[in-house]
Image (cartoon, grey):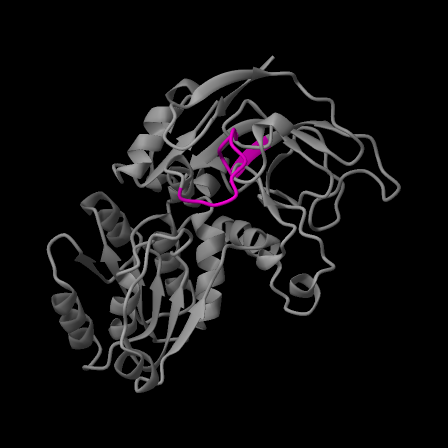
Amino acid sequence: MISAVVMTGPGAPLEVRAFERPEPEPGAVLLETLGSEVCGTDAHLWKGQLAGVPYPIIPGHVSVGRIAALGPATASGVPKDVSGAPLEVGQVVTFLDVYGTCGRCWYCTVGHATTRCPSRKVYGITLSADEGLLGGWAEYIYLRPGVHVIPLPAELDWRAFLAAGCGMPTALHAVTLGEIAFGDTVVVQGAGPVGLSAAVLAQLRGAGSVIVVGGPEVRLDAATRFGADAVLDIATTTPEERLAAVREATGGRGADVTIEATGVPAAVPEGMRLTRDAGRYVVVGQYTDAGTATFNPHLDLNQKHLEVRGCWGSDVGHVYRSVRVMARYARQFSWTDLISGEYALAEAQKALEDVAAQRVVKALVVP
């Protein structure tokens, strides 16, 4: 039997349940879980802040595992990775948590926005535990045929990849939309994994200065260690003081690019004001409906000639590129320093509560 953590519903205590070990069907892959991240999305799931969640679920949507078994070959051959290379038992891999994107709807074919495909399902979020081992907080993970698999190169430790977790591909998507240019001043709102990853990626794209706005102190310390030029603690500064600090650092103009990664609605109008006239503002942190915010469409948007871009999740290209970037710059950035704690399956409740209370930077469930 295989043990897995099950979230039965919003607010309910997590349970550890036993599952049968599945035999992979043609084209499927069975992973022995090495580790799975605990992220803000898991806290949202526990609080019931996401719609359409088919409780009970096995949480954990970004994970790393070692291939334990491969299903029989299909008409197109043995299971392959995203580069087309055959997968092998023993390989250490991650995978795109989004499953079932149709490739045929308007969003997939015309809009080129696969993250909005109505057929998409997400491991650890919108796939029920009643359907099997479809989340990472388990000893094994069942990858259905068609799941996009990305091997981790030897130079990238699996813990290093999970240290950023879903934050890295999400931030990579946001930073790409931000079109950061050499010498730009970039403000990142939020010091969680998405914000910290965005701060790193902004540096790699040639930003002249990176300012991180957020908290608590443990996360701002991580931002400084990972190269932020300045940090502004929301616990000790007012929005007016933060605006004055950013303008002072930019000759009175404001940031060339601002990336919102907070999940707090009130951060959005503030971020618009932190951005210079004719600058770009990318909103990536509003993954759940946490309420409304008010801005002045004349002063904050139209007169500023501000460009605002929404960014929802990530696709397989973002995950693939994240693996490549993290492997290439592993010497410059000690990714594993972001890991505050590792938790066994029986400790998943504590991991979830620590993340929800922002007592950690990154928590991992390690079966």
Pick the residue in front: 148 or 223: 148
Pick the residue in front: 264 or 241: 264
Q: Is residue 161 left or right of residue 266?
A: right
Q: Is residue 350 above or below residue 164?
A: above
Total marks shown come to: 0
Q: Residue at x 54, y 36 (%)?
A: 54
Q: Is residue 310 above or below residue 220?
A: below
The kind of secondary structure the magenta stretch mainly shows is loop
Pinpoint residue 32: horizontal percent, then vertical percent: 60, 25
- Determine the image quadrant of residue 213: bottom left
- Determine the image quadrant of residue 142: top right
Q: Which residues are magenta?
A: 49-65
* Residue occupying the far top of the picture: 1
Pinpoint residue 227: horizontal percent, then vertical percent: 29, 57
**Quadrant placement of the N terminus:** top right
Asked if the magenta segment contains residue 62, the reply would be yes
Q: Quick check: can you spot residue 341? A: no
- Determine the image quadrant of residue 202: bottom left
Pinpoint residue 30: horizontal percent, then vertical percent: 67, 28
Q: Is residue 72 above or below residue 104?
A: above
Pick the residue in front: 183 or 123: 123
Asked if the magenta segment contains residue 307, the reply would be no
Q: Is residue 298 left or right of residue 67?
A: left
Q: Is residue 57 left or right of residue 357?
A: right
Q: Residue at x 16, y 65 (%)?
A: 239
